[in-house]
Image (cartoon, coloured by chain):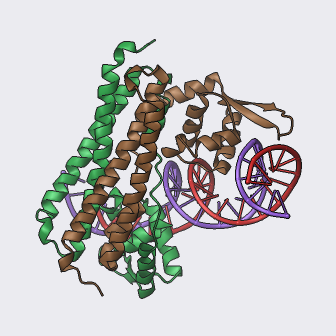
Chain colours: A brown, B green, C red, D purple
DNA sequence: TGCTACATGTAACAAGTTACATGATTAT
DNA sequence: ATAATCATGTAACTTGTTACATGTAGCA
């Protein structure tokens, strides 16, 4: 259900056509809610049927025309109601945790390599986030209302990644220190 | 695809019937991969068709009979191959992050309450994890091979929750300190 | 009497993924 | 030439969720 809300939240910024929306779901919004453009087009159609967004066809010279979507008053109310309704923690579904759980069925070296791989990916992601932080939120104390929430969202992404990175480092250290007892084939 | 792997990983411990499998997916396994029993039954059927698990009907007195599933040699090889294949970071899809992103459309108090709600939920979850840690992994240095991976999986859950908790606390502090500039209706 | 636990499923629907399809413009 | 960008979609499939359906045993 929350893809609808993620789209509405993005359209609260300003109207977007499907193509541009999808680009936001690759970048900023996509860091905490990813969606393919097929999903976005499908959802936009549904949101329009429900009267939560409204589209306007805009013809362009030397480019395909676009349908630009904007949130209606009903859409904004719908979004507000959803935000006001308490929600549960996002459920976790993590391949790497499944791998770790069954780690005893492969040589330890295999798990160690995968941990190092993920450690590197999380480091890279954190670097990207820090870059954005420096560029857009250098002075978090003096941010206008809207940007303040964007800043906190970004901080959420950073803390999330830090959690995984800390774990990767600790798990690598642990498996390395206890490798004497490893029985590799 | 990874539900299949999560089931195989669980069945590597010992054979389970669908009902008991589902219980594991409520508790331990469910902390990093949840699945409803409808999903589990459906997937078990498919895994059996593919020859990755094998079931045995066991009649019981004064209880319904059960189908107990065990991993086949092909199933174990399949699981090993999957673990050896590097995977991407798990994609994030988090309602609370969407709410934060669009936080400016509701009074600040609304967001603060939701943050406190999530803070409490993460604290509770961490308490549960710490309890398991003390009960089952009091001496991580001297764990047998298999339990060692279970311990690291649990540590992953703890770090993950810590990441979110740290963020909740920081975001609450930030919004509280900067509430002077809030424009509540 | 009604609730929980045991045990397994079907059906319908919603959400997410992968592949296919079209067609113009602009940059290399 | 050909690749990338802009712009929108359909079709088929897999996953995940919700609701319905059935029946026994044991407990309060």
Q: Does residue C27 appear to the left or right of B174 in the view shown?
A: right
**Can residue B55 be seen in this snapshot?**
no
- Using the image as rendered, state which of residue A77 and residue A128 is in the foreground: A128
B159 shown above or below B6: above
- Using the image as rendered, state which of residue A41 and residue A175 is in the foreground: A175
Residue beneath the point at 63% across and 43% down: A23
**Can residue A34 be seen in this snapshot?**
yes
Q: Does residue C23 appear to the left or right of B101 in the view shown?
A: right
Indicate the position of residue A129 as horizontal and vertical percent values: 44, 42
Residue beneath the point at 33% across and 54% down: A165
A162 shown above or below B27: above
B150 shown above or below A13: below
> Total number of numbered labels?
0
Q: Quadrant of residue B79?
A: bottom left
Residue beneath the point at 49% across and 70% down: B43
Residue beneath the point at 44% across and 50% down: A125
B51 shown above or below A166: below
Indicate the position of residue B179 as horizontal and vertical percent values: 35, 17
Indicate the position of residue A164 as horizontal and vertical percent values: 34, 53
Q: Does residue B117 appear to the left or right of B103 in the view shown?
A: left
């Amino acid at each position: 259900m929350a893809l609808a809300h993620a789209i509405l939240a993005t359209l609260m910024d300003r109207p977007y056509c499907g193509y541009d929306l999808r680009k936001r779901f690759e970048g900023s919004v996509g860091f905490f809610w990813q969606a393919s453009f097929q999903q976005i087009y499908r959802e936009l159609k549904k949101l329009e049927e429900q009267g939560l967004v409204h589209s306007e066809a805009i013809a362009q010279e030397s480019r395909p025309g676009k349908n630009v979507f904007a949130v209606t008053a009903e859409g904004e109310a719908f979004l507000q109601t959803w935000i006001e309704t308490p929600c549960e923690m996002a459920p976790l579904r993590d391949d790497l945790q499944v791998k770790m759980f069954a780690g005893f069925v492969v040589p330890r070296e295999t798990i160690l390599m995968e941990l190092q791989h993920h450690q590197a990916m999380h480091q890279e992601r954190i670097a990207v986030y820090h870059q954005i932080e420096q560029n857009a939120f250098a002075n978090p104390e003096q941010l206008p209302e809207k940007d303040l929430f964007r800043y906190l969202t970004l901080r959420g992404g950073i803390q999330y990644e830090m959690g995984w990175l800390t774990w990767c480092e600790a798990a690598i250290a642990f498996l390395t220190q206890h490798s004497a007892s490893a029985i590799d084939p």
